[in-house]
Image (cartoon, rainbow, N blue to C red):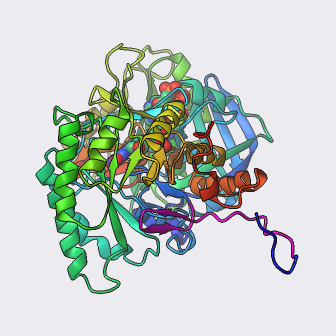
Amino acid sequence: MTERANGAPLDPSPDLSVSLGPIVLDHPLVDASGTFDLLEYARRYDGDYFADFPYAAYVPKTVTVDARTGNPAPRVTETPSGMINAIGLENPGVRAWIARLGEWAHLRQPVIVSVGGNEPEQYAAVVAALDEYLDAAAPGAAPSIQGYELNISCPNVSSGLQIGADRAATAEVVGACREATSRFLLAKLTPNVRDVTEIGAAALDAGADGLSLINTLKALVLDRDTLKPFLGNRTGGLCGPAVKPVALRMVAEVAQAFPDTPIVGMGGVATGLDALEFIACGATAVGVGAANFTAFEAPQRILAELREELAARGFASAADARGVALSS
Amino acid sequence: MTEAGHTHGDHSQWAETSHCRVAAVRHFGAFAVLELIAPRVARRAAPGQFVMVTVPGGGSFLRRPISLFAAHADRISLLVEARGGGTERLTRLDVGDAVEVAGPLGSAFPTEDVSNALLVGGGIGCAPLQYLADELSAAGAHVTACFGFRDFRSARAAGAFTIDRLWVATEDGSVGRAGTVLHLLAALDVSPGTTVYACGPTPMVAAVQRWTFAEGLHGYVSLEAHMACGTGSCHGCVVDTARGKLRVCAEGPVFRLDEVTP
Ligand SMILES: Cc1cc2nc3c(=O)[nH]c(=O)nc-3n(C[C@H](O)[C@H](O)[C@H](O)COP(=O)(O)OP(=O)(O)OC[C@H]3O[C@@H](n4cnc5c(N)ncnc54)[C@H](O)[C@@H]3O)c2cc1C
Ligand SMILES: Cc1cc2nc3c(=O)[nH]c(=O)nc-3n(C[C@H](O)[C@H](O)[C@H](O)COP(=O)(O)O)c2cc1C
Ligand code: FES
């Protein structure tokens, strides 16, 4: 901290802005894909949600090339300190998705589109369709889509192989998308692997600009009456506070292995201190997922708490706190 | 009622958190009616809508969906059955306790142009029907209710209701007529054009649906689903309908009887 030239008191409010690769964020918090629908928030809010949008960037639910109806019910339930879901990437497909972009074109914050698929070509087709649309769109006709997050880590789609558990498959998906776009590319990693840095290396070598992690942990919940799998998909993905220590460990491993790489850390963030812990483990930005389900105002609260945590510890900026857990 | 008049519109949903106090509690066995001071919820509410309730005391990660049992002036009431850890905690709330709710959420029962209404409920599914009966009666409709319960224990809920023409059946015959709501329906003399409103366990809803169509009537049903957000974001609560997969928390919980296959 430096004192101002005129000797005025130091501004106690830390600088929250961070750079996620080329994307400048007002603060480190973004929503985790699939847990926050901007238009649904806007229509359940008294004010102008676009003006009051709490996240620094918007990550919508994963989009695939064709429409998906998702998994049979039930799809969600609570678990100790968290929840399990098996939504199955329900989405209208990229064409229908693009057709609705005008409804939220006036969002000021940058958008990172989460992209899913079964084959490399399907991922690349989504990215290409969006890039093509954006390049042709009139100014103001579409939100500010500045990057893609490749969801190679959803545990709830029965494509057999989980792409993000295999180095070669990861490289193929990332490589195909790298050819399709010059926009910022994140690869979203699964925790369901032996070594998350192996997959991270494969993604970065194939052209990813950064990494986000973790997606959910593959898990099983039984119906307490029948002792059969509770979810319609049988297995699902575990998230929420229960997974935070696993997520922190993996973010730290990735940050240590790839020190200058932009990282979006997530998994169980429910408070500002949780978010600071991810930054301390090397995250550039922090995703908030299931905590969105606990209160409409969760993002605003977590952001206020993060600001207080940074100030209370004397950090002049969020960037200053990055990686402090990693140095001995 | 300006906002409540737009029953199927999303603009009648409101997801910001209301910090409320418990104004009154009445117990009926394992059930409790919680009266909460929640002016902004009450003002917008319509029958059939629900709130997401934060389980007090921590320990529960997700909020619980609970129907509006009544709404008057600055108050809303909830009828809660202690079924698991969260609802058990809610039934133990006391006067003066703080509780957080978000709502009203979801679609409402259409009530316009209804002169004869038949309300059919099973178990805790009866909860949204008190508020519906209040609104229909206030609008001058003729309201009859048939409620079915499993046994004496679950029939305790009936004590919470104030509906003039209310018929009760229990499967074990301990209260009211022995049998199910279907037995009550069979004994009714139903006027043509009656609107049927149903809420209850899936087998009951399916049977009421068959009965309604056989009688040449139409109606609405409120469905349950396991929810995470309750506000349209997670797609955790979908059901199959004639309009495709729809979210119980957003397009529902109230659907037309002829568009669902329970
Ligand atoms: C639209 C709607 C309206 C409802 N209205 C009422 C009401 O007015 N009064 C009332 O007592 N109950 C109502 N319920 C059911 C109530 O939400 C569940 O009983 C409650 O969530 C159970 O929580 P628990 O912690 O006691 O049980 P647990 O079984 O311990 O809960 C574990 C998880 O499963 C979920 N869950 C369990 N049972 C159900 C269920 N039947 N439906 C949805 N989620 C469930 C819980 O929310 C929680 O996430 C309603 C449900 C829905 C969907
Ligand atoms: C209901 C639900 C839906 C999700 N959908 C997606 C999705 O579509 N794409 C994706 O990449 N991750 C999805 N996720 C995973 C989250 O983005 C996040 O990685 C994970 O939940 C861990 O964060 P959390 O503990 O804060 O929820 C979903 C999670 C939940 C709970
Ligand atoms: S519970 Fe999340 S969309 Fe309905």
- Residue A159, located in which quarter of the rendered image? top left
- The quarter of the image holding the N terminus of chain A is bottom right
- The quarter of the image holding the C terminus of chain A is top right
Left or right for B13, reference A60: right
A97, A242: nearer the viewer: A242
Does the magenta-highlighted stretch encompass residue A25?
A: yes
- Residue A185, located in which quarter of the rendered image? bottom left
Residue sitting at x 38%, y 19%: A223
Query: Magenta-highlighted stretch: main secondary structure?
Result: loop
User: In the current view of this chain or complex, which residue is farthest to the front?
Assistant: A328
Q: Where is residue A99 in the image (x, y as percent from the top left)?
A: 23, 71
Left or right for A165, reference B141: left
Q: Position of residue B195 (x, y in %)?
A: 34, 52
Q: How many marks?
A: 0
Q: Where is residue A19 in the image (x, y as percent from the top left)?
A: 50, 64
Q: Position of residue A258 (x, y in %)?
A: 42, 46
Q: Can residue B167 be seen in this view?
A: no
Q: What stretch is highlighted in magenta?
A: A8-27
A206, B196: nearer the viewer: A206
Q: Can residue A264 be seen in this view?
A: yes
Residue sitting at x 70%, y 28%: B92
Residue sitting at x 60%, y 40%: A327
